[in-house]
Image: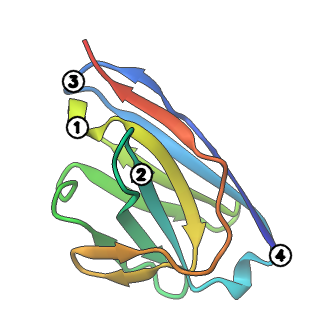
Amino acid sequence: QVQLVESGGGLVKPGGSLRLSCAASGSIRDSYAIGWFRQAPGKEREGVSCISNSDGTTYYVDSVKGRFTVSRDNAKNTFYLQMNSLKPEDTAVYYCATNPTCMEGTVDAGRGAWGQGTQVTVSL
């Protein structure tokens, strides 16, 4: 069973940057990908990005492409979401999860494990 713990959220001004971390423990090798999702108040959860565990292929939705970068550190079993040029509409609770469905432009939740989330607020 995989356990995920996110960290790195906070308050940042528009145009600023944050790096989120997702520390994984347990049977992470059984997971084929890690996805990043977010949920803003009053809105549905949406997939943001994901990275394949096998070959490191990355996927992004259009709203974050060119601004966000997903990466992994296999030695640390940790996954990252570098977020640059942040906008107020990026404000949400961000989650990492295992085994999403990853396609270019679309990241859908699967039946994997989820972290508890970390709050990102982009505001003056």
Q: Alpha-carbon distance for marks 2 and 3? A: 18 Å
User: Which residue is under mark 1?
Assistant: 89
Residue projecting furthest to the top: 124
Q: Mark 1 and 4 residues: CB-CB less than 8 Å, in contact?
A: no
Give the class, few, some or many, for how many residues have Cα within 10 Å of label 3's Cα (few <14, many ≥20). Answer: some
Residue type of the residue flagged with mark 3: Pro
Q: Between residues 107 and 86, which one lies in front from this camera angle? A: 107
User: Which residue is under mark 4?
Assistant: 1
Report x, y in % for residue 98.
60, 73
User: Which residue is under mark 3?
Assistant: 14
Q: Quadrant of residue 104?
A: bottom left
Report x, y in % for residue 122.
31, 26
Give the mark nearest the N terminus, 1 or 2: 2
Q: Residue at x 40, y 60 (%)?
A: 70
Number of labels in the image equals 4
Q: Alpha-carbon distance for marks 1 and 4? A: 34 Å
* 13 is higher (above) or lower (below) than 24: above
Q: Quadrant of the N terminus?
A: bottom right
Give the mark nearest the N terminus, 2 or 3: 3
Q: Alpha-carbon distance for marks 4 and 3? A: 38 Å
Q: Residue at x 42, y 70 (%)?
A: 50
Q: Alpha-carbon distance for marks 1 and 3? A: 10 Å
